[in-house]
Image (spheres, grey):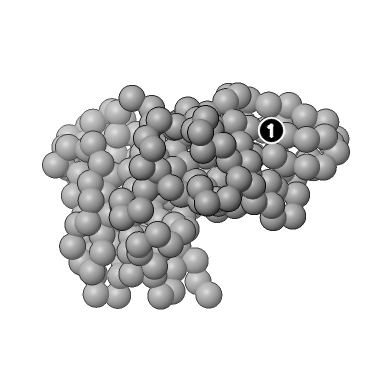
Amino acid sequence: ETGVTQSPTHLIKTRGQQVTLRCSSQSGHNTVSWYQQALGQGPQFIFQYYREEENGRGNFPPRFSGLQFPNYSSELNVNALELDDSALYLCASSLGGDQPQHFGDGTRLSIL
Amino acid sequence: QQQVKQSPQSLIVQKGGISIINCAYENTAFDYFPWYQQFPGKGPALLIAIRPDVSEKKEGRFTISFNKSAKQFSLHIMDSQPGDSATYFCAASSTGANNLFFGTGTRLTVIP
């Protein structure tokens, strides 16, 4: 059983640029959630996708957007990057509902 | 506002000792309380979880104690080992909600 995989593992961007992060969910998992983990902090919920639709959103601005594809993989897009966007971005997949969320190893995004 | 408060921030325990990490919450709608273990450069891994219908859950050396009236829950690691050295996060969510609210993490160091 393949776990949650994320790409790329590391990324360096400059302020104002745009970035796309990718996530392949664990086999059979139809729900994908994205979290932002700042250094030394716990993950913070960005949004969740279920059946290709956004299914809940945390306190993040609209420049954070996402997609989910028919194979349940997902993308996180961030526009107009700011220095505070530097963080580890985590993807978690689950079977939805109250089922446990399983995390990938994240993408480390650095903004210069 | 931090939905889940976690303490201590860091913890040093001798090999063979008991590690105890505490969390508190305010939202009485929370009904799912997982603990995650995170190693450097890795994503959080689900360790153990509890629902409010029981006061304790044990899996191997890991035990969650839950006090519904006090709105507190804790993780006990028995016979702590150097391999347990990691950052531990408590989290909470409510039925039908899409997101986990994480604590700020506890960095555990087990000294040989």
Which residue is pictured at 69% across the width and 52% down the height? Answer: B58
* A50 versus A104 height, above or below: below
Q: Position of residue B35 (x, y in %)?
A: 55, 45
Label 1: how many Cα within 10 Å (few below 14, some 14–19, many 20+)? some
Which residue is pictured at 43% across the width and 62% down the height? Answer: A99
Q: Secondary structure at mark 1?
A: strand
* B9 versus A65 height, above or below: above
- The chain letter for the residue carrying disc 1 is B
Q: Which residue is mark 1?
A: B20
Does any portion of residue B88 appear in the rendered image?
A: no
Which residue is pictured at 43% across the width and 47% down the height? Answer: B31
Amino acid tagged 1: Ile
Q: Position of residue B18 (x, y in %)?
A: 78, 35
Q: How many marks?
A: 1
Which one is nearer the viewer's eye here, B36 or A11? Answer: B36
* A25 versus A79 height, above or below: below
Which one is nearer the viewer's eye here, A67 or B22? Answer: B22
Residue A101 lies left or right of residue B99; in this view the side is right
Which residue is pictured at 64% across the width and 47% down the height? Answer: B56
Q: Position of residue B108 (x, y in %)?
A: 67, 33
Does any portion of residue A1 appear in the rendered image?
A: yes
